[in-house]
């Protein structure tokens, strides 16, 4: 029955290199022992250039959402005035978590598929100067929008509000410049551009955010970053970590470092441009305009997308993601992040062509983008 | 420099069988796709006999403490009157988590190294009938005590209090009979007797506990079991899970099932009896009396234990755990749980003998226990 290999083209979890998977089979060690302490703090330090920061980075064993909740649990007390910028599924998730923590919740909604309008954010903050924390998503993978974090950071103007960014599906695939942009908390996770299996989240914290967290008297335990800070001084985590994921990430970082981060980012931009050129050549409509387009995932409008996706998966082994929320069954999404290459984009386009019996046009358009790069 | 293999004899994480580690290298798949849905609910169902329950079991990506906090987050609102039974480090952890959730906290302390006295619990509940939830530890790995959960459950008498049990370091190594004992919530984790790397916690919930949780209006998100229940109906988790751990656990369960759970439990009892007989033959003092002794970990009194442990680890590759809290540097602890056999106990005893230049006596005593078994 073997004819096509499974090709996972969803926006995470993404294919993991065999070299990295091999590290998942590392024999078990003591998480309070020397071997772990020799690797763990170095892995976190090697994440700093990807976060664009000199701030400490903490690791929580859990999904990306656990990382998001860690930010909220440490920053938000009941009635803390917060502003969530919502233009998709994960922006909405920020709002839901803040609500669970009884924040005084402000929400600025943006149309799904459009980037966050920084001017609107600036105006809102002038109107509600009491807002203390802003939550936004860098790469809104539900819509395939890359938001301009720097513009939002700047739009704060005289507001002292902290800016918290979900960079789960961007970090490692596109530049994140926490310090240069003036971001206070950045959250990411292992299973996207970091090419590592799911199970670990990362949270970078600025001194200003740390000070704000110290004043928060709300209860927290598993997500309490004060504990993580205390244990990181010893090269440890407060609770038994996902040891194998740390070893896997060590290897994945080595691979990204060998390629060079600038080359990694250029590869992602190239895959975006190829995917978009190919989809356009097929006459398909993209969800997002060029200026807001994500380098890690592309969303394509497609009627009855779910049946189409099932057909492509069952026939060719290529798995695309569907739409969420208002986009359910209206779009499909092609992940091109982490361990993905321009040739993977070509095969993604090829199956679209074959399915539509429009042979060659999309691949040709994408090849020309590749050739010009 | 190779002369001795590393031998991890700590009470978790424990050595993971190569067969199980191999499954950690499973290629990445979609956590919303068919392959995952075919495996995940079955793995949870196969845990039910180890929990001794027909209740649903939920999986949270996180450490054992994340599992404990999941229980608290769903059961405890501010001022919920709870009773924590504390006789060691993990009993204390229950109290700390409940405190973080602003419970009205009652604590019954028992001497470290002694089992929980169920009669005292019964008396306390008569005195404070308002208590709604009791938190206890089954196997207190910090002291090597196995507490009598059934006796505590019975001691509730007319109290309607829910009983929540941390079975992190017992489940899979000794019988847990959630339904027969009348326990309402049982928490466990992958990295102990389940012979799987750390990163996943499991929470079984009785109908009575579920009803109680439904009335809790406190905010919760990542640990919200209502979400986990909703997604489990589709064979999924609400947040991207530790996919590789699920495959590893699938294999570990297969190995435990092949051995037979009754045989697994007998093996743990045998290792306990061998370890204790050997330590006694060496003239060492055990922390715990026979009646309260854990089948998964043994604690031995030893002055300047930490220097001794370092010597044993560096000389022979055998790694014991140290003491926590009042026992720091006063004891060492030998883990004999999960992927451990009677021969591992013999080598643990052998290095003790060699270190003390009392050749043969401990191994002989343990061999006799093995021979009689």
Image: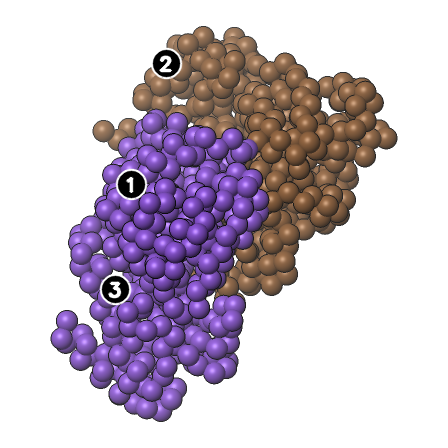
Chain colours: A brown, B purple
- Do we see residue B336 in this rendering? no
Identify the secondary structure beneath mark 3: helix
| Above-or-below relation of B311 to B142 | below
Residue B317 coordinates in the image, percent (x, y): 40, 74
Residue under pointer 2: A307
Q: Residues within 10 Å of mark 1 (few under 14, many from 20)?
A: some
Chain holding disc 3: B
Q: Are marks 3 and 2 on the same chain?
A: no
Q: Nearer the viewer, mark 3 or mark 2?
A: 3
Q: Residues within 10 Å of mark 2 (few under 14, many from 20)?
A: few
Q: Residues within 10 Å of mark 3 (few under 14, many from 20)?
A: many
Cα gap from disc 1 to disc 2, whole angstroms: 29 Å
| Above-or-below relation of A292 to B154 | above
Q: Nearer the viewer, residue B121 or A281?
A: B121
Res. B43 mark: 1
Q: Are marks 3 and 1 on the same chain?
A: yes
Q: Is residue A101 left or right of residue A121?
A: left
Quarter containing the N terminus of chain A: top left
Quarter containing the C terminus of chain A: top right
Residue A279 coordinates in the image, percent (x, y): 52, 15
Chain holding disc 2: A
Identify the secondary structure beneath mark 1: helix
Residue at the image position 28 percent from the left and 28 percent from the top:
A3
Cα gap from disc 3 to disc 2, whole angstroms: 51 Å
Residue at the image position 32 percent from the left and 34 percent from the top:
B207
**Dots 3 and 1: beta carbons under 8 Å?**
no
Res. B268 mark: 3
Residue at the image position 60 percent from the left and 34 percent from the top:
A101
Chain holding disc 1: B
Residue at the image position 52 percent from the left and 68 percent from the top:
B325
Q: Quadrant of residue B42?
A: top left
Residue B355 coordinates in the image, percent (x, y): 39, 86
């Amino acid at each position: 029955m073997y004819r096509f290999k499974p090709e996972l083209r969803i926006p995470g979890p993404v294919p993991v290199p065999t070299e990295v998977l091999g590290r998942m089979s590392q024999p078990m060690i003591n998480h309070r022992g020397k071997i772990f302490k020799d690797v763990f703090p170095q892995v976190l330090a090697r994440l700093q250039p990807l976060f664009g920061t000199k701030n400490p980075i903490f690791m929580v064993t859990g999904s990306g959402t656990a990382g998001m909740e860690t930010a909220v649990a440490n920053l938000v007390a009941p009635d803390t005035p917060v502003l969530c910028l919502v233009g998709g599924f994960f922006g909405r998730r920020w709002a839901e978590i803040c609500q669970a923590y009884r924040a005084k919740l402000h929400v600025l909604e943006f149309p799904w598929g459009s980037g966050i309008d920084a001017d609107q954010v600036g105006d809102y903050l002038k109107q509600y100067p009491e807002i203390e924390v802003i939550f936004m998503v860098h790469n809104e993978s539900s819509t395939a929008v890359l938001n301009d974090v720097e513009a939002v950071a700047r739009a704060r103007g005289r507001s002292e509000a902290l800016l918290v960014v979900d960079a789960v599906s961007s970090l490692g695939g596109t530049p994140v410049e926490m310090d240069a942009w003036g971001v206070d908390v950045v959250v990411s996770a292992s299973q996207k551009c970091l090419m590592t299996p799911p199970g670990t989240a990362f949270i970078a914290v600025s001194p200003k955010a740390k000070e704000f967290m110290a004043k928060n008297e709300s209860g927290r335990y598993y997500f309490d970053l004060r504990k993580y800070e205390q244990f990181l001084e010893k090269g440890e985590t407060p609770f038994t970590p996902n040891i194998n994921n740390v070893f896997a990430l060590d290897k994945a970082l080595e691979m990204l470092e060998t390629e060079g981060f600038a080359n990694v980012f250029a590869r992602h931009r190239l895959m975006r441009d190829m995917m978009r050129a190919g989809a356009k050549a097929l006459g398909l409509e993209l969800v997002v305009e060029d200026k807001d387009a994500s380098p890690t995932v592309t969303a394509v409008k497609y009627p009855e997308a779910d049946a189409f996706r099932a057909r492509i998966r069952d026939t060719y082994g290529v798995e695309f993601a569907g739409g969420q929320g208002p986009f359910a069954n209206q779009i499909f999404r092609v992940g091109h992040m982490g361990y993905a290459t321009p040739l993977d984009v070509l095969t993604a386009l090829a199956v679209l062509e074959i399915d539509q019996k429009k042979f060659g046009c999309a691949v040709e358009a994408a090849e020309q983008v590749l050739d010009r790069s």
